[in-house]
Each structure stands twice: as C-alpha cells, then as structure tokens.
Image (spheres, rainbow, N blue to C red):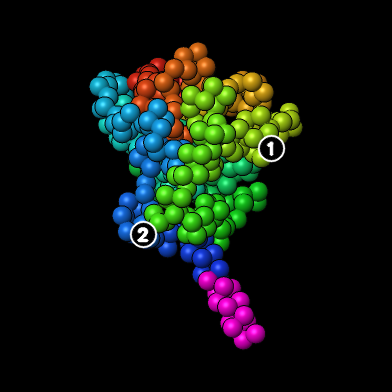
Amino acid sequence: MMVRTALKYILIVVGLAILYLSTSKNMMQQISDARNDNDEWWGSHFAYEGDLVGMSYLYYEKKFHKPGQRIYKPKKCDSGKGVNLVIWGDSYTQYFGDTCFCADKYQYGRRYFSKLDYTLDSSKRNILIIESTERLVREYFANNRMANEVKLLSYKNVLSGIQRYYKQVNTAAFSIPDVSMLFNEHINQNIEYNLFNYNFVSPARKMKAWMNYKVFNRASGDAVLSDDADRLFLKETTLKKGNSGYANPLTNEEIDKLIAVFNDLYHRYRNAGFDEVYLSLIPNAVTIYQPENYNMLIPRIQQHASLKMKCIDIYTVFRQHPDDMYWRGDTHWSNKGADEWLKIVNRILSDTSYNASL
C-alpha cells in the first residue's frame, strides 16, 4: 500500500514537472537545443526530409522527401525609394533574410514565438505585411491580440506626438490583456515531445508507420495521405471540425468578425505611422490540392467589400499553377512557392507610385 501511494505521488510530481517544462518557452528552448539532432537514446531526430515525414515516420518513402534546403537567392532591386519593411509572420516567412526583399531595412517577428518591437522612419516608405498560414487565421485573428505583440519601439525623424498617439491607441479599452507569460500555444506538441519523442522509440514507430502505409494505405501520427496518395497533409487542416480544418463550416458572421479585427489592426498601424499595411494569407496545402468542400476562407476574406487592407494574393497564383508549390512531405511551400510570393512582395516594394492614403 505504501509503495502504491509513493508511486502515485511520484507520478504526480513527474507530471507537474513535465507540464511546467512544456509550458515554459525558455525551458523548452533549452531542452530542444540539447535533444534535437542528438544521436543518444534520449535525443530527437529533426526531420530534414520534411516535417510531415517526421510526424508520420515515413522516412523510407523517398517520394515525400524534400529535394533540398530552403535557399533563397538575393534579389536584384532598384526600388527608386527607400523602404522600411516590417513582417509579422510565421514559419512560412521566418527563413527570409533582408537580401530577399527590395527594402533598405527589414524587421521580422514570428507569431507565437516572439514579440516584435519595430522602428519606423519617416524618410522611407514604412510597410507592414501581416502574413499568416491559413490554418491559424481563425484562432489568432479572433481578437486583436496582435496589437499587444507588435509595438512601436522608436520613430526616426518625426514628432514625438505620433508616439503618444500610438500609445493611446494601443491601450484602448478593447485591447486584450497580455497572457503570453501564463500560456504556451504549443503545449500539446511540447508534452508529446517530452513524453514520447525519443530516439529509442523510433524503430517501433517506423515499423508501425510502415504497416499503416503498406497494409492500410494511410499515414500515421499527425499526417494524412492525400486522396491520390501522392503527398502528405497535416491532419488538422483536413478535418471538418476545428478552426484549422479547411472544410469546417464558416459563417458570414465569423467572416465579418475577422474583417472587423483586420480593419482595426489596419487603422491602428496606419495611425502608428505605416504608409501601407498588407494582409497575406498562405493557403493550406490541402486547400490547393484537394479543394473539394473548401470553406473558401481566404477568398471570402480577400474579396470582402469592407476589408481595408490590400491583400498579397498568393492563393490565386497557387490555384492556377499548383505544381510543385509545396513540398510533398512538409507543411510548407517549396522554394518555388516561396519565390512566387517574393515576386509579388518585391513588385509592391519596388512600386514608387504608391498612394500613401490607402
């Protein structure tokens, strides 16, 4: 009886410790730095072949492997006018460097992982791009939390009154409280990583993945096979429930609420000093390759009559020319897909006939 009681308390302590580690962003960074790409039994292999390949343990299926790394060539630009570019994005844009853009200055912040204290310069075109993968739009932009995560640090060559006005806008009554220190949006993935993602269990997972794929024609883990079995999709994007699902019903009321949030953010950052504010929604791979039953989230936002922001429309480009725009075994666009997006962005940055009153 004493042994059972002691074991129960040990499990409780271990569970609380894992919960704490999985919630703390600093601790998770230290853990991942120590474990990722470590060959020891307690290490964790990073799936260079593609994140969906890693999720499904289909390492031996070469057709799902990424053909190469994300390498983006420097852009040759002659913009004719200085540009200060600020991007608030996610994993789709985090690997772009300043040489990718026709801009004199480039500032970047990754949603969910960091905040962004940007600077502005009135002698340049100050441009903000709000980029988001489709599966996160309905959750993240359900409110204006971005206003608490992307803030003005300094403004060169302007009166301090602009800064005072921005502070007034940012502390308006309808701003949401900052709770990022209490919660971690990746808690579920972190718990799974800390409990199960170890090299010593990989052989068993690979065997299970092989059986599922060869015998039952399906993928394992958080990945699913496309209908033609030619690529992998992130499971949550294929579901008919949940905010990430491309087929989850979407009402006009929810669209209107999203538009209201986007318009609020547009006015905030225009008032803060940006000359232009753009919205860029990156479609899920399943949206492009299996469009049946799509709830039309992206076109309904981009074509909404009340939307104030201009859109960087990569959805239409991908729908018209879908070949090789996404890796077959990764959630992200390929180098070709990323280059198509960069072409659109750099055309905007190089356009010297912009209208500052937009």
Q: Where is residue 112 in the image (x, y as percent from the top left)?
A: 49, 48
Q: What residue type is disc 2 on?
A: Trp
Determine whether 43 is above or below 320 in the image. Answer: below
Q: Where is residue 333 in the image (x, y as percent from the top left)?
A: 43, 29
Q: Which residue is drawn at 47% across and 59% down?
A: 194
Q: Where, by quadrant of the figure, is residue 47 drawn?
A: top left
Q: Residue at x 53, y 71 (%)?
A: 14
Q: Would residue 281 be seen by someone viewing this image from the given angle? A: no
Please indicate whether residue 327 sits to the left or right of residue 70 in the image.
right
Q: Which residue lies furthest to the top in this view?
A: 320
Nearer the observer: mark 2 or 1; the answer is 2
- Foreground residue, 355 or 85? 85
Label 1 packing within 10 angstroms: few (<14), some (14-19), many (20+) = few
Q: Where, by quadrant of the figure, is residue 242 drawn?
A: top right
Q: Main secondary structure of the magenta part?
A: helix
Asked whether 343 falls inside the magenta stretch, the response is: no
Element type where label 2 sits in the image: loop
The tag on residue 357 is none
Q: Position of residue 137 (x, y in %)?
A: 58, 36
Q: Residue at x 51, y 34 (%)?
A: 213
Q: Residue at x 43, y 59 (%)?
A: 28
- Foreground residue, 236 or 102? 236
Determine whether 70 is above or below 21 in the image. Answer: above
Determine whether 3 is above or below 67 in the image. Answer: below
Which quadrant of the figure contains the N terminus? bottom right
Start-end of magenta stretch: 1-14
Q: What residue type is disc 1 on?
A: Lys
The tag on residue 41 is 2
Label 2 packing within 10 angstroms: few (<14), some (14-19), many (20+) = few
Residue topped by disc 1: 241
Q: Which sits earlier in the primary sequence, circle 2 or circle 1?
A: 2
